[in-house]
Image (tube, grey):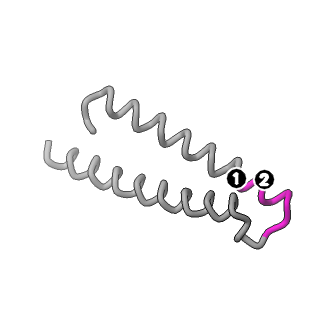
Amino acid sequence: MPGFTANVTAAKSVMAFRVLTMAVDLCRLTTRTMNVNAGHERTSKARIIHQIQLIRGITKIIALSGNL
């Protein structure tokens, strides 16, 4: 299944990039270098944390299925 392997590799790369981007955003939010109001800051932080949790869950499912 060479096509499947390429798709999994591409999906892992995209996932890693998204996690890195979200981690940078979360770091900026926690150090208050992002110029936003307090309400938006809390909303953004919650959204980023939720996305990281989703990706963590997807990664665990893939690992359990033996495709990671």
Which corner quadrant holds the C terminus? top left
- Farthest front residue? 31
Q: As drawn, is 19 to the left or to the right of 47? A: left
Let me know if residue 40 is in the magenta part: yes
Residue 42 numbered mark, or none: 2
43 w.r.t. 29: above or below: above
Q: Residue at x 39, y 30 (%)?
A: 61
- Farthest top residue? 64
60 w.r.t. 39: above or below: above
Q: As drawn, is 51 to the left or to the right of 65? A: right
* Label 1 crowd bin: few (<14), some (14–19), many (20+), radius 10 Å: some
Q: Nearer the viewer, residue 1 or 46?
A: 46
Q: CA distance from mark 1 to mark 2?
A: 5 Å
Q: Which residue is mark 1?
A: 45
What is the x, y in percent for residue 17?
A: 43, 60
What amino acid type is highlighted by mark number 2?
A: Arg
What is the x, y in percent for residue 65?
A: 30, 27
What amino acid type is highlighted by mark number 1?
A: Lys
Q: Residue at x 77, y 59 (%)?
A: 41
Magenta-tinted stretch? 36-44
Tell whether label 2 touches label 1 (CB within 8 Å): yes
- Farthest left residue? 2
Secondary structure under tag 2 reads helix
Majority secondary structure of magenta residues:
helix
11 w.r.t. 58: above or below: below
Q: Residue at x 61, y 60 (%)?
A: 27
Q: As drawn, is 36 to the left or to the right of 52? A: right
What is the x, y in percent for residue 60?
A: 40, 32
